[in-house]
Image (tube, rainbow, N blue to C red):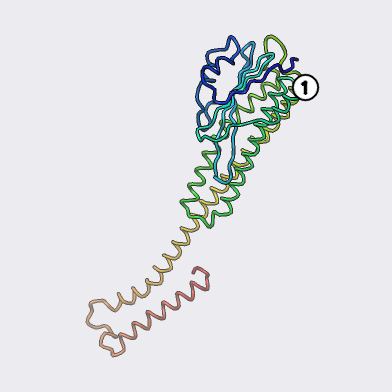
Amino acid sequence: MAAVDSWTDLLDPSPEELRAALPAGLHESALEQLEAPAQHDDEPRPKLENHGDYVFGVFLIPVVIPEEDLVYYQELDLIVTGHALLTVRKTPESGRAPFESQSARDACRKHEPLGMIVYHLVDDIAEHYLDLVDGFNNEIDELEDNVEAWGNEQVRQRLSNLRHDLLHIRRTLSPMRDAVRAVVDNRIELDSGELFSHEVEVAFGAAYDKFLRAFEGLELSRDLVASVRDYHVAKVANDQNEVMKRLTVIASVLLLPTFIVGLYGQNFRHIPELRWAFGYWWSWGWIVATTIAQLTFFRWKRWI
């Protein structure tokens, strides 16, 4: 198990700086990924691959800013050989400060093995995903608390945004979990020697457990979003029922007066009340009486 000879950390390097730091025999696909600019959302896909004399990895680190209701991803590429570690950090499109792992730097100063330093990097990323899921659940709680107060359009937009964020997180969290599992299962190793010893693999198991907790928390978040959506749909349906109930009450209240007016508005000559001096007030009396009776009945039934 080799000790650390060098850790080269590059931030937004130029092509010349990058090529000068790369080990010999680098695969063309890895070189293209290292030279590619930082992309957005869930691209590129996280991975950790064995390329013979070196291990190549692409990690995406989520960063949550609750004050701005913002989640963005930072890209970290790494190449590990038997005696050197190269990390390439790329500034996000938003221009915010890129990811830094203080625990990995502390481990480097303590001269821990390369594999253990990579573990500290991965463990910090796992903590970011746990923080992301916690922040996501806080967003869901806020939506659930305000679903009655906010307008329907605002709630629908918030639900749509949360569902899209869920999909983005899932598309990055799953490959990150699988990449760490490959180390735990001893499927990632150098051809020229041992990079991930048993001790390092056990440590990666702890990071893998964090990714599992984050994934389980994400599944719970999806259920919570579905519950809020179902509650919102039921609330909209109930509000529509209340509107229909009021319209039905109005129609019912107008029904009997309409019948009375229609009854005395028939074109017949011999209507008993037609030439009666109090006929007009008679019809009005029936209209008022039936209206009051209906309103009293509806209030008694608590329909209004």
Label 1 residue SS: helix
Determine the residue positioned at 55% across, 39% down. 71
Q: Residue at x 22, y 82 (%)?
A: 269
Question: Where residue 258 sits in the image (x, y, percent)?
Answer: 33, 73
Q: Is residue 179 above or below residue 62?
A: above
x, y percentage for residue 7?
66, 20
User: From the viewer's perspective, is 239 left or right of 224?
Assistant: left
Residue density around tag 1, few if under 14, some if 14–19, many if 20 or more, within 10 Å:
few
Which residue occupies the foreground of this view, 185 or 264? Answer: 185
Query: Would you identify the image quadrant in which residue 253 lies?
Result: bottom left
Count of numbered marks: 1
226, 269: nearer the viewer: 226
Measured as percent of width and height from the top left, residue 233 is found at: 51, 51
Identify which residue, 44 or 214, lies in the foreground.
Answer: 44
The residue carrying mark 1 is 199
> Where on the picture, by quarter, is residue 77?
top right
User: Image quadrant for the N terminus?
Assistant: top right
- Relative to 29, does residue 233 appear above or below in the rendering? below
Residue located at (52% from left, 69% from top): 302
Give 293 or 199, whichever is nearer the viewer.
Answer: 199
> Which amino acid, mark 1?
Glu
Please, which residue is most extreme toward the right here? 199
- Against 257, residue 68 (above or below) is above
The residue sitting at 63% across, 11% down in the picture is: 52
Residue 229, percent across and down?
53, 47
